[in-house]
Amino acid sequence: MVAGKQKTDLTGRTLWLPRMTYVGARMAAASFRSVGICADVTPPSDEKTLELGGLYTSGEECYPEKVTIGDFLRIVHAEDFDPRRTAFFMPTAEGPCRFGQYAPYMRQVLDELGHDDVPVISPTSKDSYDGLGENAGELMRTMWRAMVAGDIIRKMLLKIRPYETRPGDTDEVYSLGVERIASVVERRKISSRRKIADIVEALVEIRDRFRSIPARYTKDRPLIGVVGEIFCRLNTFSNYDAVRKIEEHGGEAWLSDVTEWVWYTNWSQKANLELEGRKFSMTMFGAIIKNAVQRRDEQKLLTHFAEDFQGYEEPHDIYGDLLKPAWPYLPADGALGEMVLSVGKGIYMYDKGADGIIDISPFSCMNGIVSEAVYHTVAADHDDIPIRNFYFDSTSSNMERDLDIFMELAVSYRKRKQKKRRYPSCFG
Ligand code: SF4
């Protein structure tokens, strides 16, 4: 699980996590802390991120890799950097996507800089996260719960912020919520039952603060589904805060969350086991149990938000709700990764009454390019709902230029759409 030759010894080290989303990374760091690993989130990305990322990449790499490496190298180039007290966290994945190269490349860069003593912790589902040591089970369960809680409060933020009457209120409650939940997650030596009860208590407290934000809910804002490459769509630095731009253009964004990816990898694992003739194996049994436990934990947290998320319900069955509808365009047994999720989620959001779908991806991202190739047909089969790819890199994006036009199309579609939205009770 360590990229390169080092052993996993995190004693006395800070494990730095990339901020794909601040809330996700903060929750993951809190989860590591809950099992005694000192973990922290890399500071907010800035010009130095791009400068260092540009110095240590050739231009062929994906934009998220440039941002992640740049953020890690800011730690390495800091005046107080101590290689004996530093480690980096970079998960990896199997398959055709370039994401699998991020961790080995970070290892190579550190080695070239003479820091072969700095570990790159790179968990993979291939070894069932064995490398996380004896606390792997507890860590993974805590991280899952924290991830779900993080997705929930981000969803509350995006649902309320466009309608707040005092600018800044929702962001403030959100920031408080991130810290409140992280403080509960990171508590050590707490039983599993007590841990989820504490997370529920914190979530409910934050939910009530969200609910009390002064807001004027109106039904005239187009609802824009946001899908695409996971890092770029969630990392506000990489996408120039695309969701806020949608809001500034009069829309409300429904952003695809992080947990969707976990449900997809669970499905993939089971599909692969079947392909290998291991449908009736202990590995399959373990995968089914894990899926059921994760679903139960998710329900325990989500149930307190049923009223808030009426009309914004996330898919319950990753195959039936996303992969199957996407199959005629991109069959999930051949087209692997986020491209099928983007197409499936776009169709799912169409069914929920969204007024347009935006796909956010880095320039040259294979997922974005493949999904773009089928969106025209997807739209034609679904009442010509506007679907548009926006691409990002460190210098530009076509979103600035084309968002006005896209929002006009969404407003026009809204007047003729067949699929009506359901609204939470706060909309009256
Ligand atoms: S999804 Fe796209 S941007 Fe992300 S690693 Fe893969 S190819 Fe690169």
Image: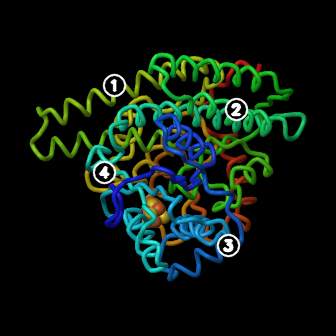
Real-space Cα separation, disc 1 to disc 4, in angstroms: 25 Å
Q: Quadrant of the rendered structure where residue 152 is?
A: top right
Q: Amino acid at mark 2?
A: Gly
In x, y percent, where is residue 344?
Answer: 43, 45
Front position in the image: 339 or 130: 130
Q: CA distance from mark 3 to mark 1?
A: 43 Å
Tell me which numbered mark, 1 or 2, is placed earlier along the sequence: 2
Find residue 292 and name its label. Answer: 1
The answer to whether residue 115 is visible is yes
Query: Where does label 4 land, which residue?
Result: 331
> Would you place residue 267 above or below residue 237 in this image?
above
Q: Residues within 10 Å of mark 1 (few under 14, many from 20)?
A: few
Q: Residue at x 35, y 53 (%)?
A: 330
Residue under label 2: 177
CA–CA distance between discs 2 and 4?
Answer: 39 Å
* Colour approach in the figure: rainbow
Q: Nearer the viewer, residue 126 or 299?
A: 126
Binning the other alpha carbons within 10 Å of mark 4 as few (below 14), some (14 to 19) or many (20 upward) gives: some
Asked whether the residues under the numbered discs 2 and 4 touch, taking CB atoms below 8 Å apart as contact, a structural biologist would say no
Camera-nearest label, 1 or 4 = 1
Number of numbered discs present?
A: 4
